Structure formats: structure tokens, C-alpha cells
Image (cartoon, rainbow, N blue to C red):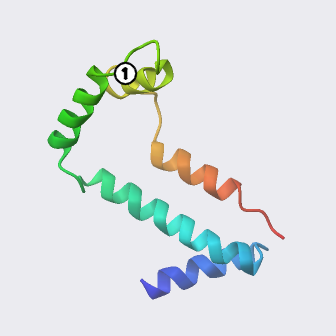
């Protein structure tokens, strides 16, 4: 783990990312990778989360939260193509600029 952290820090610095930005970037990237991984391997009880989510959605008014309900529908019926992990990682990495 320490070698992975050192390599990531080295890559950022070698690409011209400043030390202050690198400091924060490490924590953001680390949190993103671990958070996504925990979610992907079922860190939470999926069935329990789905039941709770369904109860919340059933209590919502479509007129009040149309965007949230559209998003929830995408999870169930019309999931966009692509890999969410890669999409998010690209967003994070594209935001890191040499200083």
C-alpha cells in the first residue's frame, strides 16, 4: 500500500501537478477508488438498501422531485451505457492540471 501511494504521488508530481494539489488529489483519488470498490463488492446489504430506497421513492411526489425520480428509474430500467468507475476517474484526473 505504501508503494502504491508513493507511486501515485510520484506520477502526479512528475506530470507537473503542484505539491499542494497533489496532497489533496491523493486523498480524493484514494477515497474515490476505495468508496467505489466498497460499493461494487456489496459493502452494504443490497437487499436492505433496495427495500429502503423503494419505500422512500414510493413516498415521493413526481411533481416535487422529477429529476431524482428520473435518476432512480435509470437505475432500474434504463441504465446508461458505460463504466461509472472509469467515467468518474476520468473526471477526477482531467481536473488535475500541472501548476
In the image, is residue 23 above or below residue 2? Answer: above
Seen at 46% across and 43% down, the residue is 84
- 19 horizontally vs 78: left or right: right
Q: Which residue in the structure is indicated by mark 1?
A: 73
Q: From the top left corner, tell me how far across and down residue 67 is, in percent.
A: 50, 22
Q: From the top left corner, tell me how far across and down residue 55 is, in percent.
A: 22, 28
Q: Which quadrant of the structure image shows residue 6?
A: bottom right
Q: What is the tally of numbered marks visible in this picture?
A: 1
Seen at 26% across and 55% down, the residue is 41
Quadrant of the rendering where the N terminus is positioned: bottom left
Mark 1, Cα crowd under 10 Å, few <14 / some 14-19 / many 20+, is few
Seen at 24% across and 57% down, the residue is 43
Q: Residue furthest right?
A: 99
Identify the element where label 1 is drawn. Answer: helix
Please name whichever residue, 26 or 60, is drawn nearer the observer in this view of the structure: 60
In the image, is residue 2 above or below residue 36? Answer: below
Q: Which quadrant of the structure image shows residue 27?
A: bottom right
Quadrant of the rendering where the C terminus is positioned: bottom right
Please name whichever residue, 39 or 48, is drawn nearer the observer in this view of the structure: 48
Q: From the top left corner, tell me how far across and down residue 61 is, in percent.
A: 38, 16
- 28 horizontally vs 85: left or right: right
In the image, is residue 70 above or below residue 11? Answer: above
Please name whichever residue, 28 or 13, is drawn nearer the observer in this view of the structure: 28
Amino acid at each position: 500500500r505504501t508503494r502504491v501511494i508513493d507511486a501515485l504521488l510520484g506520477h502526479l508530481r512528475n506530470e507537473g501537478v503542484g505539491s499542494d494539489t497533489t496532497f489533496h488529489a491523493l486523498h480524493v483519488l484514494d477515497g474515490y477508488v476505495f468508496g467505489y470498490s466498497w460499493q461494487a463488492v456489496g459493502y452494504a446489504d443490497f437487499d436492505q438498501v433496495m427495500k429502503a430506497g423503494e419505500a422512500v421513492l414510493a413516498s415521493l411526489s413526481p411533481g416535487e422531485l422529477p429529476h431524482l425520480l428520473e435518476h432512480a428509474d435509470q437505475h432500474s430500467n434504463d441504465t446508461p451505457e458505460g463504466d461509472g468507475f472509469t467515467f468518474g476517474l476520468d473526471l477526477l484526473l482531467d481536473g488535475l492540471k500541472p501548476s
